[in-house]
Image (cartoon, coloured by chain):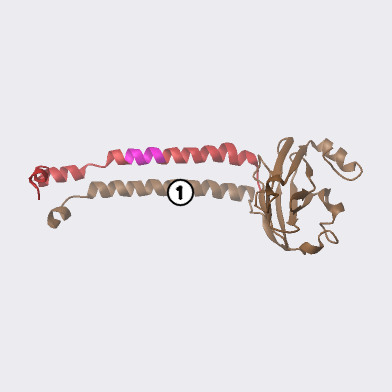
Chain colours: A red, B brown
Amino acid sequence: MLESESKTVLSDAEREALFRRTPAGALLIAGVSTAVVLLLWALFYIFVFLPRGMLQ
Amino acid sequence: MTDQVTSVPDDAAARAEKRWAIVASACIAFILAVVGYTGVHWATMPPSGIEPVDPTRLHVAGEFIESNLGTQMEPDGTLVVRLIAQQYSFVPQCIVVPESTPVTFRGTSADVVHGFLITGTNSNAMLVPGYITTFKTQFSTIGDHLMPCHEFCGNGHAAMWARVSVVSKEEFLRRLRAKGGPGCV
């Protein structure tokens, strides 16, 4: 292991503390993008598909 | 090194992943529920095309002879639109239907596979030679809709389109009584 890398190695306690944290940023990005997709789907469904009438 | 990695507590990440799986599953369940409810509520069906017909004798005998094409009122009062697609036109070129009235479309092809959609509506079907495509729909507003062929059928495909004219019920009945059946003019 290089010396420069060894400086970034965390102690066990630090690492455990780091991994205990929920990946909030990733969840936020995934949540917002999923919400946008779901919202667009709902808008198209309500304002485009439904008014265009049934097909039997 | 491996020992150190396995000793890392991953409960937080696992919990987040589990929650996210629940959210994703809920999204899919919501969409399926909405689509399922609408489908059952409307009794939605894909256009069927299982009735056979001889494409070489369409103009000679059967329900697709020329005098039978267009919108017809059946003896039981239901409205049926019969149409033929052929390279590169629809017969008839213009279809007249009344507003807010159930209409049954029955169409077939005289040569190759065609398709049509009625713009501004969910009507969308393929016309396959040898089979009759059937679906029911109704038009809620008065106006004209383009009806292009949407299945590439040859060099003239781009010029193959017809028109659906939705008129009031009174106007439709007036045209129905006119000589030659309901026409666009």
Amino acid type at circle 1 is Ile
Q: Residue furthest left?
A: A3
Q: Residue at x 58, y 36 (%)?
A: A47
Total numbered badges shown on the rendered structure: 1
Q: Residue at x 76, y 39 (%)?
A: B165
Tell me which chain the residue with mark 1 is part of.
Answer: B
Look at the image and tell me whether residue B37 can be seen: yes
Secondary structure, magenta segment, majority class: helix
Q: Nearer the viewer, residue A7 or B173?
A: A7
Q: In x, y percent, where is residue B175?
A: 86, 40
Question: In the rendered view, does B108 fall on the left or right side of A28?
Answer: right
Q: In x, y percent, where is residue B76?
A: 83, 52
Question: In the rendered view, does B7 fall on the left or right side of A38?
Answer: left
As for residue A22 lying within the magenta part, the answer is no
Q: Residue furthest front?
A: B155
Query: SS class of the residue under badge 1?
Result: helix
Q: Nearer the viewer, residue B98 or B39?
A: B98
Q: In x, y percent, where is residue B146?
A: 71, 40
Q: Residue at x 75, y 47 (%)?
A: B103
Quadrant housing residue A4: top left
Quadrant housing residue B93: top right
Q: In x, y percent, where is residue B136?
A: 71, 50
Q: Nearer the viewer, residue B47 or B19?
A: B47
Disc 1 crowd, CA 10 A, few/some/many (<14, 14-19, 20+) = few
Question: Range of the magenta residues?
Answer: A27-33
Look at the image and tell me whether residue B75 can be seen: no
- Which residue is tagged 1? B28
Q: Residue furthest right?
A: B179
